[in-house]
Amino acid sequence: MTRDAATRRGNQHAITKELQCLLADIGRCRPAHIKPLSRLREDLGIDSFNVIEILVAIEQRYGLEISEDEASRTTTFKDLVKLITRRSTRST
Amino acid sequence: MKRVALVTGGTGLLGSWLLRGLIARDYEKIYVLARGTRQRSAEDRVFDALRSHTNSVLIQRARKNVEVIDGDIRRPDLGLSPKTTHALLGHLTDIFHAAATADFRIPLDVIRVPNVAGSRHVFELALFGSRQGSVPLRVHHVSTVAVAGTSTGWFEESYFNRGQQFHNSYEQSKFEAEELAHAYRKKGLVITIYRPGIMTGDSKLGRTTNFKMIYQPLHFLAHNLFPELPANAQSFHSLVPVDQVAEAICLLSEVDPPGNPGVWHLLNPSEITVGEFVDTASRVFHCQKPKLIPIEQFPRSHLTALQWDLIEPFVPYFNYRLRFKAERTNTQLRALGFEWSCMTPAMLEQIFRYCVHCGFIPSSMRCPS
């Protein structure tokens, strides 16, 4: 594994942990229930209002602006992680 | 005269408090219309809601004179069989129609189903009953002051259609339901309309089961999602605790039906400002207090598209200018021995603290800001 790949993997791990906390705080779900393919609404029971709150919290935390199109395409936990890693990579 | 009531919305916040108020009175029988789910029967849902705020003495009483009927206001005849309808309508004296969906973000065609079509089904059944039954039947329709929509100045109990527009689908659907109530009055149905202000949890412990409407801004405030808010700190609102709204409806339902307009405004004369609301939230939830900037001066570029999406339904209420008159109602309520609790900062704190108590807002965040 190259150093870049390791850094990316480390970042992704940190992002995953932080997102689990955000989902627990705002979406009121248990971190242990959150799996990569968990659907935010159907599997984790997060309502649409709280999903937007989570996305706004991500915007603030990572200094991103998420378009409404990107928001509507974000349905799983993995989508959230990918959204942040993709945008972070693009901005570095 | 023996009184027999039917309550819709008995699993909801106001409906369950209303049911508690009726159980404490001398109703011979109270029918509650409710829907069962895959997991729980209609009866379990009604009694679970009731138990969340009602003592065991009244629950015992409820076991004797409350009968839960599995039905659905969204369906014609409330989804009841002709046999059940016939048995019910023969002796009903009062229908308390409290079922409604209260949410600012639901599309109009969706929210119309429970709020407008549902009301039509209740009124239609009541009209049929009032023509068939041997006892006079009154309908108590729970509306909202939000039917005033974009009206300006003062909105009185006698006002209704002033050519107003609406801030959201909820307001419009409740207006349309009230429009139906007026139409059914013309057909001979006796309908009293109750328009509560913004409802909160109960006045003693702040208990609620519905965390929509006023509770949604609390949630995004607690999570520090807005360093700046398009809000006017001086805008006034009348917050009415749900237990008091239910008690006021129970009391007013016992006075002679008022003539024209037959509308009561259920509003607490002690109002709070948006500034006090935000201050209290930041104190209770230990969150940052956002800077409040009136909408007319708020630069749109200060928020992202998603922040606007989140906050847009609440902006009209953060910058509210409309005032409501409720002297006629409050004079009548005082004559009945009822006084609204003063909405002090301590009471507001109690209502907000319940959000932490029940886990709606975490007591400490896992994710530090």
Image: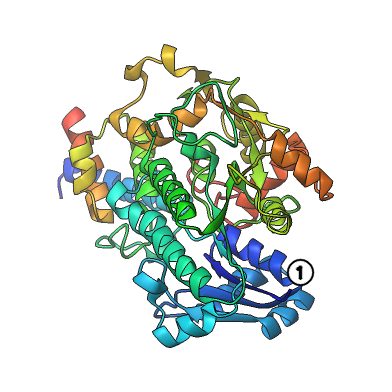
Q: Where is residue B283 in the image (x, y as percent from the top left)?
A: 67, 34
Along the line of sight, which residue is nearer the eye, B298 or B157? B157
Along the line of sight, the residue nearer the viewer: B106 or B147 = B147
Q: Which of B132 and B115 is in front in this view?
A: B132
Q: In this view, does B136 lie above or below B221?
A: below
Q: Residue B115, position in %: x, y?
A: 41, 55
**Which residue is at a point 35% across and 70% down the rendered structure image?**
B75
Q: Is residue A50 left or right of residue B337?
A: left
The colour scheme applied to this rendered structure is rainbow
For the question of whether residue A71 can be seen, the reply is yes
Q: Please rate how many residues cluster around mark 1, counting C-alpha atoms within 10 Å: few if below 14, some from 14 to 19, many from 20.
A: few
Question: Quadrant location of residue B31?
Answer: bottom right
Numbered circles on residues, count = 1
Q: Is residue B274 above or below residue B249?
A: above
| x then y, percent, for residue B358 | 61, 58
Image quadrant of residue B28? Answer: bottom right
Q: In this view, does B265 lie to the left or right of B161?
A: right
Left or right of residue B124: residue B113: left
Horizontal and vertical percent for residue B204? 76, 52
Q: Residue at x 43, y 41 (%)?
A: B171
Q: Given the current orientation, which residue lies at the most extreme top position?
A: B297
**Circle 1 is placed at which residue position?**
B25
Q: Can residue B223 be seen in this view?
A: no
- Amino acid type, residue under disc 1 in the picture: Arg
Q: Numbered disc 1: what chain?
A: B
Quadrant (top left/top right/bottom left/bottom right) for the C terminus of chain A? top left
